[in-house]
Amino acid sequence: MAPAARDAGFPTPDLTIHGPKDLNTLGTIRSKRDERITASLAYTTRDRYRVWLGGFAYPGSRIDEAAFLFNQKVGVRATPKVSAEAGITVTF
C-alpha cells in the first residue's frame, strides 16, 4: 500500500484597514481608523486528517473596530491584541 499523499497549506496572511466610520447619521461623530492582520495555515492528509492554525493581531488600536454611539457617548469594546487558535479535524 502506497503512503497517503499530503497537502500542505500555504500561509494566508491578510491586512485589513477599516474606518473611519460614521457613528451617527449625520457623520459628525466618527470612529478612528483601525488595522487587523489575520493569518491561517493548514496541513491536510489525503486519508482523513487536517491540522490547522489561525489567528489575528491588531498592530494599532484595538478598541476602534467596535466603536458605537450610545445616546451621546461613544462606547468601545476592547479586543485582544493577539489571538490564535488551532485544531485537528478528523473525517469519518
Image (cartoon, helix red, strand yellow):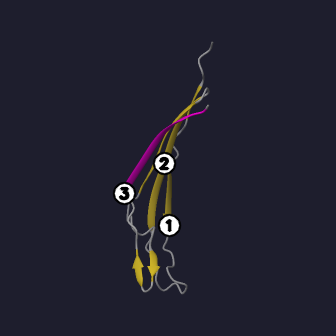
Magenta range is: 81-91
Vertical arrangement, residue 2 with respect to residue 10, above or below: above
Circle 2 — which element?
A: strand
Image spot of residue 35 (x, y percent)? 45, 62
User: Which callout, 1 or 3, points to the residue nearer the camera?
Assistant: 3
> Is 16 a magenta residue?
no
**How dense is the environment of label 2, judged by Cα within 10 Å: few (below 14), some, or many (20 and up)?**
some
Q: Mark 2 points at which residue?
A: 39
Say which amino acid is labelled 2: Ala
Q: Name the residue under label 1.
A: 18
| Residue at left offset 48%, top offset 39% | 87
- The numbered mark, 2 or 1, whose residue comes first in the sequence reads 1
Circle 3 — which element?
A: loop
Circle 1 — which element?
A: strand
> Is 85 a magenta residue?
yes
| Residue at left offset 45%, top offset 85% | 71
User: Which callout, 3 or 2, points to the residue nearer the camera?
Assistant: 3
Residue at the limit of the structure toward the top, as seen here = 1
Say which amino acid is labelled 3: Lys
Q: Is residue 81 left or right of residue 54?
A: left
Image spot of residue 56 (x, y percent)? 44, 53
**Marking on residue 81:** 3
Please report contact status of discs 1 and 3: CB closer than 8 Å, yes or no.
no
Please report contact status of discs 3 and 2: CB closer than 8 Å, yes or no.
no
Q: Distance between the residues labelled 1 and 3?
A: 16 Å
